[in-house]
Image (cartoon, helix red, strand yellow):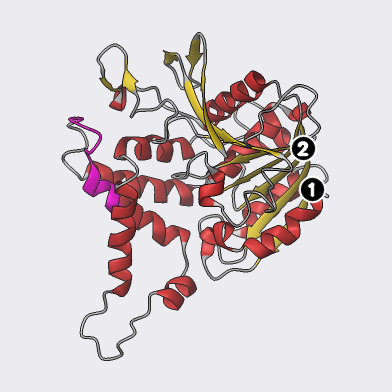
């Protein structure tokens, strides 16, 4: 997939207040450009919290030449979320007024803001119809919101391990991660994008526990030495994953994206969730994961019951919420017929 940048001419107004000029959205797409009259199917992938727009990088078993989402056969596209650390406008972007990162001067970002930015890219490319949209986790938030916001442009949509409205359970997890950022005294100093790095590592550790499961940790992080004095393999894994994220992401982008999760509510201003979902016109497939503790399957079952004609599937995984990134064969079996 090739990388591109879209710069919006004019002012972009944020749902929660505030605006910026020159909004930038980074996106990756199939190497062959999209042209009017193109007969390829358009597949739009919405990425999760700390992923990027290069879906072939973080979903390699499903995206790429000859894969389920074939970048040679179809026009596959993924846009980087607003607020992300991967190039789209956000707190890590340079504020033209100061020559320094925006930090907390950047407007708060909602899921609807992210979707509206994605739609600007769609319009810029001249795409009038999206044959299949796929999103998991917060990418699922975007996918649901977009099918409600622009019901006419989608033929099919797949929502994986997500919900139509943020739950108190999810809000509690996100707040715990932001508390970890705040506990790092360098976070509010805003001296550089390395601020809050220790807090970010802790936040990632908290998040991982919500993404995985009892069975998954026990299967992969069990001590090999039965006589070890202090178990630390899982602890070492947490530290490693925390550093791995802090090496590629910044605490400010993480804070903004985590906060955007709390804005997820397709029913806001639309008469409630069920009323909003009743207007979806896309042929929708909803996929739950049996071991997902962050988004239990009752959320996906409700979603499938509220969207007209939607179908529900459940995949089996011992890796909890992260199963949507790992159970590639099961996902392929469900999604492949939609592309036939």
**Residue nearest the observer in this picture, 231 or 96:** 96
- Relative placement, left or right, of 175 versus 292 is left
Does residue 277 appear left or right of residue 81 in this picture?
right
Q: Residue at x 38, y 75 (%)?
A: 221
* Image coords of residue 143 (percent x, y): 64, 38
What's the residue at 69%, 27% (across, down)?
34
Instruction: Tell me if residue 200 is in the magenta stretch.
Output: yes
Which residue is at the far bottom? 227
Q: Is residue 26 left or right of residue 65?
A: left
Could you tell me residue 187's position as x and y percent? 22, 37
- Tell me the magenta residue range: 190-202
Q: Dot 2, crowdedness within 10 Å: few (<14), some or many (≥20)?
A: some
User: Label 2: which residue?
Assistant: 41
Residue 226 in view, yes or no: yes
Q: Position of residue 20 (x, y in %)?
A: 42, 14
Q: On residue 339, which mark appears?
A: 1
Query: Would you say 287 lies left or right of 98 here?
Result: right
What is the CA distance from the residue labelled 2 to the residue labelled 1? 9 Å
Instruction: Write down the quadrant of residue 148 in the picture.
Output: top right
Callout 2 touching callout 1 (CB < 8 Å): yes
Residue 145 versus residue 137 in the image, above or below: above
Residue 165 seen by the camera: no
């Amino acid at each position: 997939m090739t990388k591109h940048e879209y710069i919006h001419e004019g002012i972009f107004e944020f749902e929660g207040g505030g605006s910026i000029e020159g909004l930038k959205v980074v996106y990756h797409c199939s190497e062959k450009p999209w042209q009017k009259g193109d007969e390829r199917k358009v597949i739009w992938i919405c990425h999760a919290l700390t992923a990027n727009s290069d879906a072939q990088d973080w979903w390699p078993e499903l995206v790429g030449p000859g894969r389920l989402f074939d970048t040679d056969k179809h026009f596959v596209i993924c846009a980087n979320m607003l607020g992300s650390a991967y190039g789209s406008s956000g707190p890590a972007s340079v504020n033209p007024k100061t020559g320094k990162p925006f930090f907390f001067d950047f407007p708060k970002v909602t899921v609807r803001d992210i979707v509206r930015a994605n739609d600007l890219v769609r319009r810029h490319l001249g795409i009038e119809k999206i044959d299949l949209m796929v999103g998991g986790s917060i990418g699922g938030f975007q996918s649901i919101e977009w099918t409600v916001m622009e019901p006419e442009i989608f033929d099919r949509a797949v929502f994986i391990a997500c919900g139509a409205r943020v739950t108190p359970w999810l809000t509690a997890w996100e707040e715990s991660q932001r508390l970890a950022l705040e506990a790092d005294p360098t976070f509010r100093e805003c001296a550089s994008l390395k601020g809050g790095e220790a807090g970010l590592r802790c936040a990632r550790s908290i998040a991982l526990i919500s993404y995985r499961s009892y069975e998954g940790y026990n299967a992969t992080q069990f001590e090999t030495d039965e006589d070890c004095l202090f178990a630390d393999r899982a602890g070492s894994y947490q530290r490693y994953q925390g550093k791995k994220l802090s090496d590629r992401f910044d605490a400010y982008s993480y804070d903004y994206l985590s906060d955007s999760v709390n804005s997820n509510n397709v029913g806001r201003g639309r008469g409630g969730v069920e009323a909003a979902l009743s207007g979806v016109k896309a042929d929708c497939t909803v996929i739950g994961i049996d071991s997902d503790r962050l988004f239990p399957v009752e959320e996906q079952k409700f979603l499938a019951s509220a969207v007209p004609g939607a179908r529900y599937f459940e995949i089996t995984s011992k890796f909890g919420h992260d199963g949507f990134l790992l159970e590639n064969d099961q996902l392929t079996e469900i999604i492949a017929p939609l592309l036939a």
